[in-house]
């Protein structure tokens, strides 16, 4: 739902028009009676009829504008009006200053007013990567990344997370989420492994319930935002785990492993699908007409619209920048809207030339617009285009944080336990490791900034704070990042170690997947004190720990839990029983990659493994 402020604005404009007519009549100037509102503005008509009427009124330039998505930093409100732009995005970390929910709503409304100033008053859509909560907004609730949610095996929980994310988005006005990622991660060296719910198609398919949470029972309901299934298709199967690489597999394997989650997303009514940077057997997905038009749109029956990835058309020919031929190839392949963050004017120019020269059929332009406009009507943007600020109070609210804490608890996977867990609340505990007291580390990439970063980047509860809250108030919980200060008087020592934040191809690890030297030294200091050692891994994928594991008394895979570190402590102290099961196969060493269920390799821990307490 949207604010009623625009209705008031139109009422005011109508009153001014009536007043002007009375003045002209008093002066003896003939006044021509104006027709009523255009049919496309009538919410009582069907979406199909409204789209037909609007499409008939649109010029080629207006249609091209609807297919263009610039980045907020590279376009002004005046340009939105002039070029009839249909969508704007915030890329990773792109936020207004100050980065507050209220300022986001102000920014959104400003862009929307510019769109409504166009002659046809077509509202825009605003897209963000809210991949684990409304994660670019400081103060938003940050949920576990998908790999942790896959460990929970709880589709109902994921639906709740989608609905909570939609509420926080609605308060800021943002109406389009570039999520969920329904990729099937087949090589843990891939920098997007944590964006996957798991290595088998059944897990991402069952977790498409998040689409229902985001979009609601139907688009246009309270706090309903458009969802995006990404990245179509095969991005998790590239050779060597190379982000944006080549998925070299036969079609039957592509269909058996990578296509099912998209089929499930389409069945749940997902509004948009984003194309992958990767290739399939050497052909870039951004120009693959067979997979986009023939398979996705025709065979799977997808009726929403297809959007490119950020500058995705630039990479079709392997050269930097995009050409007119690349624009034509992408649109003819079936891409309906194109992310062109900076060079959006050139994109419009090239696409216009392609249409005029016959390289891009007008029917393809009309089909793209029909798909885009239908979603705008279904979202109710023509009736309620502005931010619904009644939802601002949900951003980072207590109910959402409690939901996130529950999700963290359900996502923990207990991999080893030699009787040390659960801890007693009167145990004397020493905590070490770089991930213990760091919101940025435990949240990972796509948190406030694109790559994420260590430090107190947004409000939340660190794992250390959660441990201290769970322990008896009279018991000292000591902390030494590098393990210095531990001695034999402690009942247990907890090392929270793992990976620094990363996203996408920056996170590709083609070498080993072991812990870094500082983490290993901290663990050795704990072991030298001759106390039970619990290792909590904060990481976006399995780590190479087989050689060190015999010296640890317990091992917990915490994945990337987000802002609610108390959920980790809930499991460590037994307030929540560990029920998570591995969504990926855990390698014996990095040389086993890729390793997946059923491939005949002997893992350290098999897919689906997870202990619980007696």
Image (tube, rainbow, N blue to C red):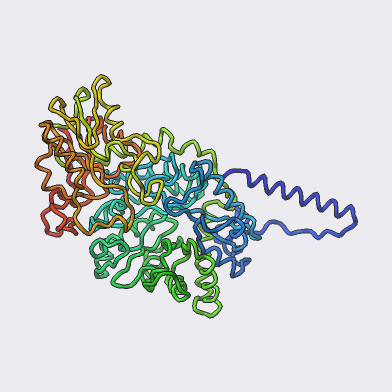
**Quadrant placement of the N terminus:** top right
Instruction: Identify the image quadrant of residue 467.
Output: top left
Residue 273, horizontal then vertical, whole percent: 41, 60
Instruction: Identify the image quadrant of residue 396.
Output: top left
Residue 60, horizontal then vertical, whole percent: 59, 70
Residue 83, horizontal then vertical, whole percent: 59, 63
Would you place residue 32 above or below residue 154 in this image? below
Number of marks present in the image shown? 0
Which one is nearer the viewer's eye here, 598 or 99?
Answer: 99
Residue 156 visible in the current orientation: no
Q: Measuring 56% from the left and 64% from the top, which residue is drawn there?
A: 65
**Quadrant placement of the C terminus:** top left
Q: Measuring 25% from the left and 19% from the top, which residue is drawn there?
A: 474
Q: Measuring 30% from the left and 61% from the top, which residue is drawn there?
A: 243
Residue 495 lies left or right of residue 347; in this view the side is left
Which one is nearer the viewer's eye here, 595 or 448?
Answer: 448
Q: Residue furthest front?
A: 484
Which one is nearer the viewer's eye here, 45 or 170?
Answer: 170
Residue 272 visible in the current orientation: yes
Q: Residue furthest bottom?
A: 357
Residue 376 lies left or right of residue 608; in this view the side is right
Would you place residue 7 above or below residue 284 in this image? above
Q: Measuring 20% from the left and 58% from the top, which residue is drawn there?
A: 511
Residue 52, horizontal then vertical, whole percent: 58, 64
Q: Residue furthest top?
A: 474
């Amino acid at each position: 739902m949207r604010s009623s402020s625009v209705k008031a604005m139109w009422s005011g404009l109508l009153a001014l028009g009536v007043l002007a007519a009375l003045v002209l009549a008093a002066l003896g100037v003939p006044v021509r009676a104006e027709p009523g509102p255009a049919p496309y503005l009538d919410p009582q008509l069907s979406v199909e009829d409204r789209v037909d009427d609007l499409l008939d009124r649109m010029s080629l330039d207006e249609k091209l504008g609807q297919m263009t998505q610039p980045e907020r930093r590279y376009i002004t409100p005046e340009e939105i009006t002039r070029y009839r732009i249909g969508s704007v995005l915030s890329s990773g970390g792109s936020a207004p200053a100050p980065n507050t929910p209220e300022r986001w709503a102000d920014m959104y409304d400003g862009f929307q007013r510019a769109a409504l100033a166009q002659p046809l008053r077509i509202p825009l859509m605003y897209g963000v990567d809210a991949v684990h909560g409304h994660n670019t907004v400081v103060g938003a609730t940050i949920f576990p990344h998908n790999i942790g949610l896959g460990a929970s095996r709880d589709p109902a929980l994921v639906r709740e997370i989608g609905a909570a994310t939609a509420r926080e988005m609605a308060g800021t006005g943002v109406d389009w989420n570039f999520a969920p990622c329904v990729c099937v991660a087949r090589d843990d060296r891939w920098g997007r492994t944590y964006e996957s719910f798991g290595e088998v198609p059944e897990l991402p398919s069952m977790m498409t319930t998040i689409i229902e949470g985001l979009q609601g029972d139907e688009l246009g309901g309270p706090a309903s935002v458009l969802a995006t299934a990404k990245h179509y298709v095969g991005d998790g199967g590239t050779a060597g785990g190379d982000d944006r690489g080549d998925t070299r597999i036969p079609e039957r394997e592509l269909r058996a492993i990578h296509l099912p989650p998209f089929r499930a997303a389409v069945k749940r009514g997902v509004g948009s699908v984003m194309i992958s940077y990767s290739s399939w057997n050497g052909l870039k997905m951004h120009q693959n007409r067979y997979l986009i038009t023939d398979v996705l749109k025709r065979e799977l029956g997808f009726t929403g619209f297809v959007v490119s990835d950020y500058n995705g058309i630039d990479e079709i020919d392997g050269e930097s920048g995009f050409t007119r031929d690349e624009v034509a190839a992408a649109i003819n392949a079936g891409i309906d809207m194109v992310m062109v963050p900076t060079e959006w004017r050139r994109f419009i120019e090239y696409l216009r030339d392609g249409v005029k020269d016959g390289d891009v059929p007008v029917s393809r332009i009309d089909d793209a617009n029909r798909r885009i406009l239908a979603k705008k009507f279904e979202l109710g943007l023509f009736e309620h285009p502005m931010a619904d600020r009644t939802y601002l109070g949900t951003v980072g609210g207590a109910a959402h944080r409690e939901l996130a804490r529950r999700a963290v608890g359900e996502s923990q996977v207990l991999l080893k336990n030699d009787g040390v867990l659960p801890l007693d609340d009167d145990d004397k505990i020493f905590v070490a490791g770089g991930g213990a007291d760091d919101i940025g580390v435990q949240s990972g990439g796509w948190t406030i900034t694109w790559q994420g970063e260590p430090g107190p980047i947004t409000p939340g509860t660190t794992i250390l704070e959660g441990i201290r809250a769970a322990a008896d108030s009279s018991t000292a919980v000591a902390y030494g990042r590098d393990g210095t200060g531990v001695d034999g008087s402690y009942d247990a020592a907890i090392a929270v170690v793992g990976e620094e934040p990363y996203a996408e191809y920056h996170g590709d690890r083609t070498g080993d997947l072991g812990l870094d030297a500082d983490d290993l030294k901290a663990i050795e200091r704990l072991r030298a004190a001759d106390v039970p050692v619990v290792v909590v891994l904060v990481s976006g994928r399995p780590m190479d720990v087989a050689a060190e594991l015999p010296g640890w008394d317990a091992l917990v895979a915490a994945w990337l839990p987000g802002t609610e570190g108390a959920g980790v402590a809930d499991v460590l102290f037994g307030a929540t029983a560990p029920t998570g099961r591995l969504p990926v196969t855990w390698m014996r060493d990095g040389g086993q990659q890729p390793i997946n269920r059923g491939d005949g390799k002997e893992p350290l821990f098999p897919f689906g493994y997870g202990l619980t307490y007696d």
